Every structure is written in C-alpha cells, then in structure tokens.
Amino acid sequence: MLSPQWLDELRARVTLSSVIGRTTKLQKAGHEWKACCPFHNEKTPSFTVSDQKGFYHCFGCGAHGDVIRWMTDQRGLSFMDAVKELAAEAGMEVPAPDPRAAQQAEQRATLNDVCEAAQAWFVASLAGERGGHAREYLAKRGFNARTIERFGFGYAPVDRQALKAAVSQFEEPLLIEAGLRIAVDDKEPYDRFRDRLMLPIQDARGRVIGFGGRILQADSKAPKYLNSPDTPLFDKGRTLYNLHRAGPASRQTKRMVVVEGYMDVIALAAAGMEDAVAPMGTALTDRQLALLWRMVDTPILCFDGDAAGQRAAMRAIQRALPLLQPGHSLGIVRLPTGLDPDDLIKQSGAKAMEELLASPASLLDTLWEAERNAQPLNTPEDKAGLKARLLTHVDTIEHPDIKALYRRELLEKFSAFAFPPRAARSQRDWKSGIAKPAAPPLSPEAASRLRAVTGGGARDGLAAAVIAGLLRFPDQILAHADELHRFANHDGRIGPAIDSLIEAAEMLDPGSETPISAPQGLSPPPDNTRFAFLREGTDPQEAREVLAEAISLLVERPALEAAIEAATARFEADPEGSFAEQKRLRERMLENQRRLGQMASKRAAQAAHDDSDVPTADKPRQPDESTG
C-alpha cells in the first residue's frame, strides 16, 4: 500500500500540464491552461489545468482529478499501472507492498462502509416520526428541502442503543473505532450522538468520514455542537467541512471563504455562496491553511462580530504569520456586532454579505487594529507595550522579506499613532511665499558624530550613503528604527551617528518628508550617483525602496563579520564544520557585495540612459577619432 506522503511527492514531481498536453492540445490562460474537454464533445473550451493546484477540472461535464486520475480515466490504466508509469518518469521507486499498510487501507474501507450506513440511517430517522422536532428546527432556520438533501441532514434519536440496532451488520469494535459509539470500562458502550441534528463530514472526494451533531434542546447542558473524534478516517486538523463542494465552486469565483461553523457554511450556500468551508470546531491548523492556499492565494476568513469572533481572528492570524509566503496571505472579514452569516443574510440580504466579502481587510491591518484596541494606550508605557506586541508578532514570520515588510509597515503605523502631529513649526520659502514645515536642526554633538563617520580616515562608502539617504528621507529612520538600533549597538564607530539620527527623527512630525539639513562640513558619499536615493530626479518611492535595501545590507554586515570570526575561532575544535560555516558566510558576504554592485550598475545604466535623452545640441561634442 502506498502512503499518502509518497503519492503527494509523486504528484509534486510530475508536471500535470506536460502529461495532459501529450494527448490534449492546451492553451496558456494566465497561470493555468485551457482546452476543449477530452471527456465530452464541446466547441468552447471549459476544461482547465492548474499545475500550481495540481488538478484538472471541466466546468461542462464536471470531470475532475489529479495526474493519477488522468492516467486512469483518460488512458484507461489501473491505479498501480498509472503510478508505476508516473514514478518511472519522476525517477522514483515504487515502494514494496507493505502488508500492514494494506491492512490499514482495508480497515479504512470498512470504516467508510460503517459511516455510509450510519449516514443513511440518520437521514431515514429525520424523515421518520422520531425526527419531527429536528424537522421543525430546520424549518425555523429556513432551510428548504433542496438544502436539506444536498447537505445530508439527519437525526440521531435519543435512545442510547438505537444506532447499534440500526447497523447491526457491523460489529461493536468497528462502531467504536468509527467514533459512533463510546466504550466505557465495565459498562455497555452507548451511542455518541443522541437527540441531535446530524450532518455528515466528508473528505475531498465526498466520502463520509465523520459526523457533526447539533443539540436540539435549548436548555440542554450538553455541548451545542459535537463532532466525531479523530479516527483512522477522520483527522479534524486535516479536514475542512464542505471542501468537496466548495473547491469546484472556488475555481469559478476565484475565492474561498472560511467561516466559523458548518451551519454558517450551509447558510451561505443556501443564499447562493457555494465557496465556503469551516474548520472542525477548532482554530485553523497549519495543514488546513496549506489546503486553502492550494485553492486560492488569499482565502477570506469571516468571523462573527463579537468578542469570540475577534479572538478567533487573532488565533488564525497567529497561526498564519509563520507560514506566510510571497503571494499568499489572508483576507479578514468581521461581521457587524452580534451577527453571524445567517443573521446578516436574513436581516440585510445576500447582497450585504457579498459586499463584505468583496472588500476584506488585510492580515496586516487586522493585526494592527486588534493590538491597538487590545488595551488602553494612555501612557508612554502603554504605547511601548503596543510596539513590543507588534514586534513579537513580526518575529514569528519566517520568510525574511515578508518579515522586513511587516516590520516596516507596522512601525510606520505605530509612529503615526504614537507621535501625533505637533503644532506646525514653519519656515518661509521666500521664493514661493509658501510656508513649509521645518525639520529641527541637528544638535552640535549629533553633527560631530556624523562628520566623524563620513570624513577623514573613517570614511565608509555604504555607511556614508545610508546616512545621507536617511537625512534626505527622514521618514525612513523610524520605519527602520529597530534594525538601525541593533546595528548601532554592535558598531562602536558608526553606531553613535545612527543613534543621533534616530533621536532627531523622533522630533519630527509623523510622515514628514522634509529633509534634515546636513551639518556643515559633512562630507558627501564617495559616489553620490551610485544609489537612487542620492540622485536628484529619482522617483521618491523607488528611492525609498533602494534605501531600504541599502539599510539591510549595512545592518547585516557586522553580524556576518562576527559570525565569520566565531567560526574561525572554532577551527581547531571542529575544522570541517568551521570551514563549511566560513565558506557559507563568505558566500553570503559576496552575495551582498553582488547586490551592491547590481545596485550601482543599474543606477549607472539609468544615468547613462537619462544622459542619452539630452538633446544633441546640449551635449559636448566628442572628438572624431576617424579624423584624428
């Protein structure tokens, strides 16, 4: 028996479009491919292939599957023949048969039979005389017969032994292992679900793997919702309710909505929004997020408008931050206070729900607002606590570029909040007659520190350029304050100058774009055309982006030098490990130098291009070498 992990690796190694393209003519359509469906006759292409998501789908006939399914359905191969052919193509060896795995697969198949039989009985019980109050509840919720049938609503009678009698063809141990019965020491087992409205939980292929039950007695002390326990079939951390229906729908809407519970999913579907799923009564897990990101780049999390919804949003954000990758994020929708999706739809109609889903808040903005509103912010200590909480979240992000961007944007929001604009101090622009905000001059001590870095024998091209850039764009000082402060603590020569700039920036109004006047006697950088942030006429946004990259290079340099020194010191004790570490670190330093060189060459090329745009009459005449 092949493990799911091995099969996933096989699917990842084989490009789906290349396999399908051997027998079906594909046309590129954005990130996907399209074609006329090979499974039914059509003139207009409705068959799509997604390498990123690993499946094909026909919107005409509903054909759907992965690369293995393609080989079995389109080529007519058996499952194992398809696997062997693909494995040979991918350079993988098919594992030898594992008797224990085969036994487990047989056990899962039997448990599927148990769950399907239980589902059929729950549905029959809802339609029978014992299901009257469950039918009344569904009528009160406004679910019509079509919705009840589609989602497989059923009813579990109150009798503790009713299920056992109904599916007597299966032995007691199977019923217990399927999560349908509970075994207690020295007592007769009893049915897990009793007097509950029942819903089947299905896997991505639509097979029943577990159940959810809602209590019907309003005054009951039992849990409102009860799910199957984890079984060989059902793993709540890997399962999303309604994924087998929402997946195909999301390929048309290009979105996936995550709500808090399965009744919310059904309310949305009844209102025409088919692309919704729900976790199994717990916070989203890493594996559920990975499932969602395979479907869409930015799933929308929709939470109830109460304190519990706010807590659920924060739990989801905290779970997602370490997993963020370029292009993958989350959108967040908070419903009006006191409303869930069903309430909102009944109160304001499906259009109101669609409007909320059309404009979700970003993950970053939701994080900022949640932490800003979490506690009173009346004192400097309170505000420092807010900053610390924000940076604690940022530190959990593993992707370096995303971490740096989150740090920058959150610190900009914090600076604008913590340092509100002061009464305008202005100086007169005598040429235009317009008053402009004035940047306070640097103190004599700060000016002296800057001159020490950029002048004489202490000259450092990158440090001097960064300092000049920060003087020109002081709004970037606080945006990178944490990085710069850590750098200052590790560099005794340049550090004091950086500290002076941070002190000066804290005196500016938030968002101020007025340059800080360079102190008299400050030497310019060795090559002030090398960096975009030092060249006149550069787009300000581009200048700030290049400045941010230069800051990251400057900040990383002392850490690399210290790490190389430490690796060298370990050479006698661990020569092989020390050499490998030194090699890795020196390659990193070379990469940084290469980035600097690219920055310089790009700017030089741009400068040359700009120069070529000058009218010929304005350029100095070059000697004609052909005439001497």
Image (tube, rainbow, N blue to C red):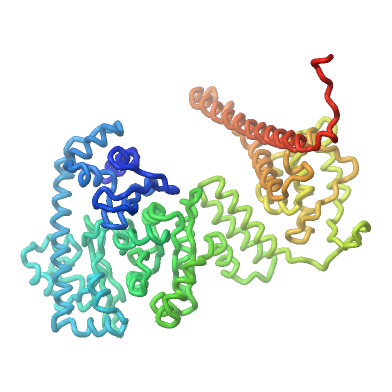
* Image position of 351 (left or right of 59): right
Q: Is residue 496 visible?
A: no
The spot of residue 40 in percent (x, y) is 24, 52
Q: On the image, which quarter does residue 384 sit in?
A: bottom right
Q: On the image, which quarter does residue 155 sit in?
A: bottom left
* Image position of 220 (left or right of 81): right
Q: Quadrant of the C terminus?
A: top right
Q: Nearer the viewer, residue 626 or 69?
A: 626
Q: Residue furthest top?
A: 628
The spot of residue 165 in percent (x, y) is 8, 71
Which residue is drawn at the image coordinates 38% and 60% (left, top)? 252
Q: Nearer the viewer, residue 151 or 117?
A: 151
Q: Is residue 437 visible?
A: yes
* Image position of 375 (left or right of 150): right
Q: Quadrant of the N terminus?
A: top left
* Above or below, comparing residue 55 to residue 458 in the picture: below
Which residue is drawn at the image coordinates 71% and 39% (left, top)? 491
